[in-house]
Amino acid sequence: MNATTQPVLQVQQLDKRFGGLHVTRQVSMALNRGERVALIGPNGAGKTTLVNQISGVLQPGSGRIELDGRDVTPLTQAQRVRAGLARTFQITTLPMALTVQHQVEMALHQREGLAHRAWRSIDGYPRVREEALQILGDLKLGHLAAHTPASLAYGEQRLVELALALALRPRVLLLDEPMAGVPRGEGHTVLQALDRLPPELAVLIIEHDMDLVFRFAHRIVVLAEGAVLAQGTPDEIRRHPVVRAAYLGREA
C-alpha cells in the first residue's frame, strides 16, 4: 500500500477480554484522511471499549493499531495524543472555574511542550493566545472566551471539549457521543460545530442519535456483541436487512 492510499488510522484484529467476558472480537477497521466514520450499535456492543483501546485508555489483549503506518499499540494515551490521536469523552470533565480561553491555551502549552512554564503570565505567549482565539473563533465560540464552563449551557461545554481536542492538532479525532446529555434545543450548536471541523481531519464518532449519524458519516461501522456486524455507506447500512432488524428498526 503506498503513502497516498494508506489509512491514517488502521485497527487490525483487535481483541479484548475481561475475565470470561469477550468484549472486543477481532475488530478490524480503517479511517482515511478527511473521512467521517460513525461507530454504532446497541448498548453493550463494545463501542466505548473499542475506542478506549484505540485511544490508549485500555490495552487490547491482541491486535494492532497503526497511525500513519506506525504501530502505536504499545504507546500510552499521552504518547498517542502527541502522535496525532485526540479524543473527547461521553461525560464532560472540564474544570469549571477556568475560563474557556485559558483552558484552550493550556492545551496548546501541552502540545508545544510548554506546560512546565505555564506559571508564566499568558501575556508572555501572544502566539498561544492568538491560536486559542482562532480555534474558538473557528467553532463560533469566540464570544465565550472569557466565560467559565460553569456559566455555559451543556451543549456549549461539549463544544469547549471539542476546542481542547482541536488544540492538540490531531490527525485523528475520536468523539464519544458528543450529543450525550445535550438538550434537544441545544443540539444544533453541536451539529454546526461538527460541520466546521477541518476537512483533512479523520473523525471516528460514537453516537446514538441516528439523525446525526446519517447526516455526518461518510461510512458507518455497526458493532454487535463486540464484533463488526456490518460496515458501509449510510445508504448501504440503512438497507442492510440484519442491521435494520437488530438495531435501526422499521423506521430506517
Image: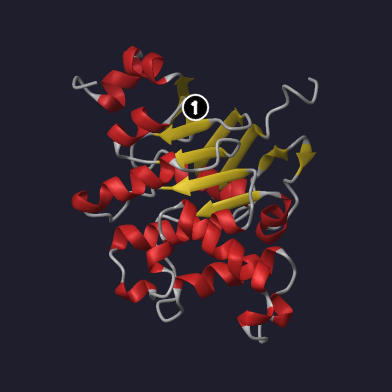
> Residue at coordinates 35% horizontally, 48% vertically from top-left?
190
Quarter of the image where the C terminus is located: top left
> Residue at coordinates 68% horizontally, 81% vertically from top-left?
124
Evaluate whether residue 46 shows in this view.
no
Q: Is residue 121 above or below residue 236?
A: below
Residue type at mark 1 is: Val
The answer to which image quadrant residue 165 occupies is bottom right
Q: Nearer the viewer, residue 188 or 230?
A: 188
Q: Is residue 251 above or below residue 205?
A: above
Q: How many residues crowd around disc 1 within 10 Å: few (fewer than 14), some, or many (20 or more)?
A: many
The total of numbered circles placed on residues is 1
- Give residue 172's position: percent from left, percent from top: 61, 43
- Give residue 146's position: percent from left, percent from top: 42, 75
> Residue at coordinates 53% horizontally, 39% vertically from top-left?
203
On screen, residue 243 versus residue 8, left or right, reads left
Evaluate whether residue 63 shows in this view.
yes
The answer to which image quadrant residue 140 occupies is bottom left
> Residue at coordinates 62% horizontally, 36% vertically from top-left?
14
Picture colour scheme: secondary structure
Q: Nearer the viewer, residue 11 or 197?
A: 197
Instruction: Say which element carries label 1.
Output: strand
- Give residue 114's position: percent from left, percent from top: 73, 73
Q: Is residue 154 above or below residue 213?
A: below
On screen, residue 70 versus residue 97, left or right, reads right
On screen, residue 241 versus residue 125, left or right, reads left
Which residue is labeled 1 in the image? 228
- Give residue 219's position: percent from left, percent from top: 47, 24
Quarter of the image where the N terminus is located: top right
